[in-house]
C-alpha cells in the first residue's frame, strides 16, 4: 500500500461520522506514523 493510497483511505475515513475509530485503528496498526511526516 502506497502513502498516497493511505492518504485516500484517511480522507474517506475522515468523511465518516466516526473518524476517531479509524485513527485508533491506524495508531494500533502503525499506519498513522507512515502517513504523517
Image (cartoon, rainbow, N blue to C red):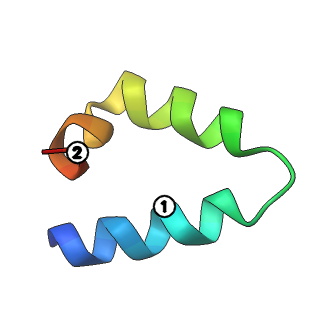
Residue matched to label 1: 10
- Under tag 2, what secondary structure? loop
Percent x, y of residue 30: 26, 31
Give the answer, above or below, for where 1 lies relative to 32.
Answer: below
Q: Quadrant of the N terminus?
A: bottom left
36 and 22: which one is in front? 36
Q: Nearer the viewer, mark 1 or mark 2?
A: 2
Residue 1 shows in the view:
no
Res. 20 visible in picture:
yes
Q: Does the residue at mark 1 contact the one at mark 2 (Cβ under 8 Å)? A: no
Quadrant (top left/top right/bottom left/bottom right) for the C terminus = top left
> In screen coordinates, is 14 left or right of 16?
left
Position of 2 with respect to 25 (left or right) is: left
Residue 15, by quadrant, is: bottom right
Query: Mark 2 — residue?
Result: 36
Which numbered tag is attached to residue 27? none
User: Residue at image x 32%, y 65%?
Assistant: 6
34 lies left or right of 6: left
Query: What residue is at 65 percent from the left and 58 percent from the top?
Result: 14
Q: Position of residue 22 (x, y in %)?
A: 60, 42
Q: Is residue 11 left or right of residue 36?
A: right
Amino acid at each position: 500500500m502506497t502513502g498516497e493510497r493511505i492518504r485516500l483511505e484517511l480522507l474517506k475515513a475522515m468523511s465518516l461520522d466516526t473518524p476517531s475509530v479509524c485513527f485508533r485503528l491506524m495508531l494500533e496498526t502503525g499506519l498513522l506514523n507512515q502517513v504523517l511526516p
